[in-house]
Amino acid sequence: MDRVTYYLGILIIASLPLYVIRWSFFGYPTTFLEVLFFLFLASYLLQKRKEKKFRFHLPVLSIGAIFIVSATISLFVSPDFLGGLGIWKAYFIEPFLFFICLYDFLSYRPRAFRSFLWAYVFSGLWIGVYALYQWFTGDNPFAPHEVELGRVTAVYNTANAIGLYYGPILALLMGEMIRRPQKAVVPILLSTFFLSVLILTKSRGTFLGLLSMEAFLLFSYLNRVFPSRKTLIRGAVSILIIASFAGSILFLQSKQKEAHSVTSAYRGSDTFLVRTIVWETSLHMIKDNPVFGVGLDGFRERYLIDYRPAFVLEDFQYPHNLVLTLWLETGILGVLSFLFLLGVVTRMVLKDNQDYLGWGIIGGLVYLFIHGLVDVPYFKNDLSMAFWLLVVFAASREKIINYYRNDE
């Protein structure tokens, strides 16, 4: 079962975006990704029954369990229990179980890391090939409205989804470039391809995330190349990051002022303006529901019924901000446990001397957090799985680096 689990792990990572293939089995709604996950889980459990040994990462396991508890509480707060149940299962339970199983598997078989990493890259590659096909042909059955805007979406219903999925992949590829600059032809070609696809999405949030991620990776690389000039380099990169944040905040504030002046002449095509209105509304929702939020899958219903401004025509699934979405969907316990998890993972990776894998992981988290200022890089089947995959790589990093040390 060891090899079966290994190949199923590769297959599930390479197929993360295929959650879009859906059907019902005797009334039970499922996806292709979920079927692969259950096969992987069954193979893993059969393997464990034979091996009778198990490893877990206690800090991440403990915080993750709190995160799951918050989601479970929010399930019973939700105005739509069945809708919330689907989200609870697909965005929380299955990804967390995936983390537990994959961490244990890599603990005993760190050599499998490269296969899992390149399966993740391959998932982005086939997404990109299909996106290019859409651009050349104009054929997009998943999001016909995006064709009119000249944007590609691959298998998703919005162009932003490609950027949300690609960010961590690009960060890990750039880590590979740092690992072996003299043999970085493949990572460079793949990164160029992914960036070309991202240009076709025309997603401003994506480029904001990429700018922050590249600033971090530049900082890491310069620290490695010029260790005697760390103070100067840190200062310069810190100024760059602060300037990026300041520019973003000033831009968002200008849009918020514009939002306050909106009347019946509402311009729904300005996505930043739309989001500032939704953010302000979300803050009102949090003020009214500060502890438990509005429950899993509760934002859309409560927004439509109780909070949507009269001049706004759009319907929103989430508030287009990671922290606001976590607070409203999982309560204050959910947002705090998630942010604490990010802090623990970051500290876990940065406590030792930096290495290529650590740079890639933290670069990916930086991207998700910055893009998360204007979007939601977790509340989708593939994104939640990909997030916990990054956590697996972080928790297993020391074993992986030690195993591949002779290959550096």
Image (cartoon, rainbow, N blue to C red):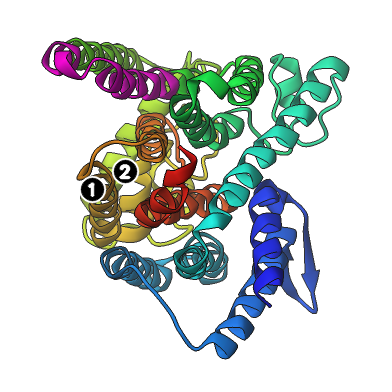
Q: Note whether 53 is above or below 107 in the view shown.
A: below
**Residue to which mark 2 is pinned:** 323
Query: Where residue 368 sits in the image (x, y, percent)?
Result: 41, 36
- Which one is nearer the viewer's eye here, 342 or 331? 342
Query: Residue 105, labelled with which disc?
Result: none
Disc nearest the viewer among 1 and 2 = 1
Query: Is-magenta flag for residue 226?
Result: yes
First in sequence, mark 1 or 2: give its number: 2
Query: Where residue 72 sits in the image (x, y, percent)?
Result: 39, 72
Q: Residue at x 59, y 35 (%)?
A: 161
Contact between marks 1 and 2 (CB within 8 A): the answer is no
Callout 1 amino acid: Gly
Q: Quadrant of the C terminus?
A: top left
Query: Is-magenta flag for residue 35?
Result: no
Callout 2 amino acid: Val
Q: Note whether 41 is above or below 145 in the view shown.
A: below
**Magenta region: which residues?**
208-235
Query: Where residue 93 sits in the image (x, y, percent)?
Result: 49, 69
**Of helix, strand and loop, which one carries label 1?**
helix
State left or right for residue 236 relative to residue 16: left
| Direction front: furthest residue | 406
- Which one is nearer the viewer's eye here, 24 or 62? 62
State left or right for residue 252 relative to residue 375: left
Q: Residue at x 62, y 17 (%)?
A: 192
Instruction: Determine the image quadrant of residue 208.
Output: top left
**Residue to which mark 1 is pinned:** 343
Q: Quadrant of the N terminus?
A: bottom right
